[in-house]
Image: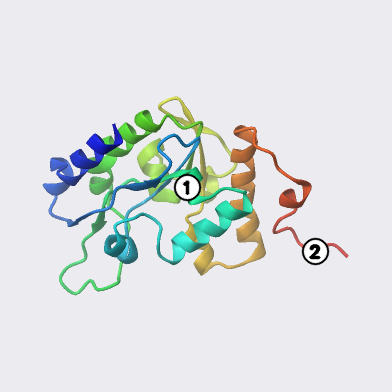
Amino acid sequence: KLAYLQMRAQNWKPARALGTLRNTMVFATGNAHAQLMLVGEAPGYDEERLQEPFVGRAGQKLNQILAAANLRREDVYISNICKFRPDMGPNQGMSNRAPSDEEIAACLPIILAEIRAIQPACIICLGGTAAKGLLGSGASVASLRGKWFDCQGVPVRVTYHPSYLLRNDTLPAKRAVWEDFLAVLEQMKLNITPRQRRFFLPATS
């Protein structure tokens, strides 16, 4: 199913017809039988170059979060709402932008089909674009955090995109993302150690 979807995504007419997305398709990575699915917004410069989601600095941050949860990239399924890097013109260089509402809508059927193929136990939306696509909500990540949502019968949790932690490298920001991951680990009935529960909490005297 995923091989078929990858082929469909490469030539997905609704996305191609917009003329606002670049040509290199970046599909997904990870375990096709994963219990946890992570969904971001769109490929950036590094992802387009290597044709794999979350391989730049934000991807390295995501790997660190997964490692803290005793998970590896190979254990989960990682994808994006939009399979093509949004275009910014001939002088784009390494710059990236978030997909527009029109681009999200054009690409949405592919990611929804991926969810049906993977049938994960849980989905994490990494950032507002993923939440807008899967949940239809334009609300801020801050207002969506801490709650459970549903997408095609799968429980969904919303957290900040890893790039947020690159811009906001503070203990409260790290703890916020970690609490979202803890909630997902609990939902999936995975073991959480007392030490993991204390990650990113202020040191007590």
Q: Is residue 170 above or below residue 111?
A: below
Q: CB under 8 Å between callouts 1 and 2?
A: no
Q: Secondary structure at mark 1?
A: helix
Q: Quadrant of the N terminus?
A: top left
Nearest to the eye among marks 1 and 2: give it: 1
Figure quadrant of residue 9: top left
Residue 97 x/y as whole percent: 31, 62
Residue under circle 1?
A: 74
Q: Amino acid at mark 1?
A: Glu
Q: Give the percent coordinates (x, y) of residue 10.
A: 18, 46
Answer whether residue 185 is visible to the viewer in this image: yes
Q: Along the horizontal axis of the image, is 73 left or right of 136? A: right
- Closer to us: 143 or 66: 66
Q: CA distance from mark 1 to mark 2?
A: 33 Å
Along the horizontal axis of the image, is 77 left or right of 70? left
The residue under the point 26% across, 35% down is 109
Which residue is found at the position 65% from the left and 56% from the top? 175
Q: Which disc, if any, is residue 49?
A: none
Residue type, mark 2 in image:
Ala
Q: Position of residue 90 (x, y in %)?
A: 15, 71
Quick one: which residue is furthest to the right in this view? 205
Q: Quadrant of the C terminus?
A: bottom right
Task: Assess disc 1: are there few (<14), some (14-19) or many (≥20) residues with their C-alpha within 10 Å of its C-alpha.
Answer: few
First in sequence: mark 1 vs mark 2 = 1
Provide the secondary structure element on which disc 2 rests: loop
Please indicate whether residue 90 sits to the left or right of residue 145 in the image: left
The quadrant holding residue 20 is bottom left
Disc assigned to residue 203: 2
Q: Does residue 136 appear anywhere in the picture?
A: no
Extreme residue toward the top, this view? 153
